[in-house]
């Protein structure tokens, strides 16, 4: 389903200029991943957030005029809107209006494959919907298929408040069960002296491709945000084939990821929290690699994985010259105080070196 989307980027007074534009670029990628076509973008400098509409009166008029001219189907605001702001804007524009969170939820819904990730996405969506229900439970957003209205898999999302609460309890129990199974597996691995390493990083940084390059298993990477939502595991062996480390690939991070979404993915993220080592993948060619690095570290803090051993890899270096790679590595070191290993998951550059580092760091 193709929808014309008008994307509204936001520059707040206390953040630096590039941040809003960068985030808007990312919003464009997100909306493309969600299936929007012919998106147009506007960046607005906000002096003060309006309680009822988020945007100022003048901006509202501008946007409405533009949406009519362009024949847009949906307006996507690069912010976290309150339920009231969302419905007020929707009414004012006479269009479906969604925020960044709902767009991400929508992508999650379409990409969830495993039973566990479907439950996790549904849980996140139900939690998102609860405060947005009117009366007995009518969703504020206009229904009908399209971005911002989809549920995970074939599930029809419940809209009755009482039933939603029951469903949340049911899903939480299901997730607790899968958590138990995981913890049992971890316990067994621990008893066998098996080490685990989790690949983490910003979405689209190349985690799944690295997984495949390291282990020979897993899926092909995709040029999409949030292609991976569940956890996949595969093993690597040391040079003499005696020692084994289990590698897991998991959901990527993004800036302004709402905490409730992180919490919904607790079961998946546990592999990260309980692993012996993290392999943090950075996309060397994206804008603001250092900012995205910080964003990932922040989320690792939030899920309680801040004190882990970390190997940082700078991926996609096949797209850069040696000089550029050296420059980024040293700049990264100055900015973060950390060393990074330049690799290419695609061509296999330094992947054996990475393997060596993995075994070495787990020895001590
Ligand atoms: N040139 C180049 N492209 C790469 C490399 N590694 C990954 N890519 C590409 O980057 C895109 C994203 O790769 P994925 O492996 O799916 O990234 P991911 O981190 O798993 O992404 P999500 O699961 O969506 O968070 C794909 O188009 C890959 O082909 C690399 O070393 N070099
Ligand atoms: Mg992936």
Image (cartoon, rainbow, N blue to C red):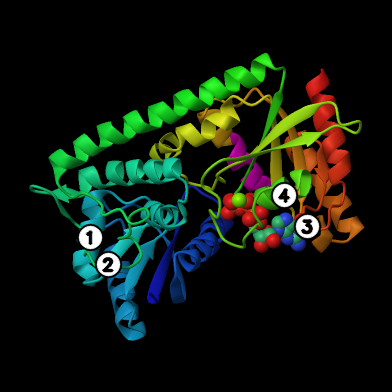
Q: For the residues carrying marks 2 and 3, which lies nearer the camera in this image?
A: 3
* Residue at image point 42% right, 58% down: 110
Q: CA distance from mark 4 to mark 3?
A: 9 Å
CB under 8 Å between callouts 2 and 1?
yes
Q: CA distance from mark 4 to mark 2?
A: 40 Å
Q: Which mark is residue 141?
A: 1
Q: For the residues carrying marks 4 and 2, which lies nearer the camera in this image?
A: 4
Query: Is 136 covered by the magenta stretch?
Result: no
Q: For the residues carrying marks 4 and 3, which lies nearer the camera in this image?
A: 4
Q: Main secondary structure of the magenta part?
A: helix
Q: CA distance from mark 1 to mark 3?
A: 42 Å
Task: Check disc 2 and report the residue beneath it.
Answer: 96
Ligand 1 closer than 8 Å to label 3 CB? yes
In what quadrant of the picture does the N terminus appear?
A: bottom left
Q: Which mark is residue 6?
A: none
Name which of mark 4 and mark 1 comes first in the sequence. 1
Name which of mark 4 and mark 2 comes first in the sequence. 2
Ligand 1 closer than 8 Å to label 2 CB? no
Name which of mark 1 and mark 3 comes first in the sequence. 1
* Residue at image point 85% right, 53% down: 325
Query: Which stretch is magenta?
Result: 288-297
Q: Which mark is residue 346?
A: 3
């Amino acid at each position: 389903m193709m929808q014309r989307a008008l994307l509204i980027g936001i520059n707040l007074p206390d953040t630096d200029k590039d941040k809003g534009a960068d985030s808007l670029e990312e919003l464009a990628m997100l909306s493309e991943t969600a299936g929007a076509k012919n998106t147009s973008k506007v960046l607005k400098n906000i002096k003060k957030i309006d309680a009822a509409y988020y945007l100022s009166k003048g901006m509202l008029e501008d946007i409405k005029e533009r949406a009519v001219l362009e024949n847009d189907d949906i307006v996507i605001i690069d912010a976290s809107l309150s339920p009231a702001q969302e419905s007020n804007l929707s009414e004012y524009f006479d269009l479906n209006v969604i925020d960044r969170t709902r767009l991400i939820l929508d992508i999650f819904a379409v990409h969830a494959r495993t039973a566990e990730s479907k439950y996790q996405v549904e849980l996140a969506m139900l939690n998102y919907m609860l405060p947005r229900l009117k009366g007995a439970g009518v969703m504020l957003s206009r229904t009908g298929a399209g971005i911002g209205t989809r549920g995970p898999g074939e599930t029809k999302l419940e809209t009755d408040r009482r039933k939603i609460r029951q469903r949340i309890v049911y899903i939480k129990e299901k997730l607790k069960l899968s958590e138990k199974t995981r913890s049992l597996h971890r316990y067994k691995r621990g008893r066998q002296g098996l080490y685990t390493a989790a690949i983490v990083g910003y979405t689209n940084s190349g985690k799944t491709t690295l997984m495949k390059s390291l282990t020979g298993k897993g899926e092909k990477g995709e040029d999409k945000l949030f292609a991976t939502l569940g956890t996949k595991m595969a093993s690597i062996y040391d040079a003499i084939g005696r020692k084994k480390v289990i590698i897991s690939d998991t959901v990527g991070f993004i800036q302004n990821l709402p905490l409730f979404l992180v919490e919904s993915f607790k079961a998946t993220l546990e592999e990260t929290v309980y692993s012996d080592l993290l392999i943090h993948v950075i996309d060397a060619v994206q804008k603001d690699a250092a900012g995205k690095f910080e964003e990932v570290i922040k989320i690792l803090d939030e899920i309680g994985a801040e004190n882990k051993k970390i190997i940082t890899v700078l991926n996609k270096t096949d797209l850069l010259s040696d000089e550029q790679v050296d420059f980024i590595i040293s700049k990264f070191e100055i900015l973060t105080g950390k060393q990074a290993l330049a690799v290419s998951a695609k061509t296999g550059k330094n992947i054996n070196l990475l393997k060596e580092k993995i075994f070495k760091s787990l020895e001590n």
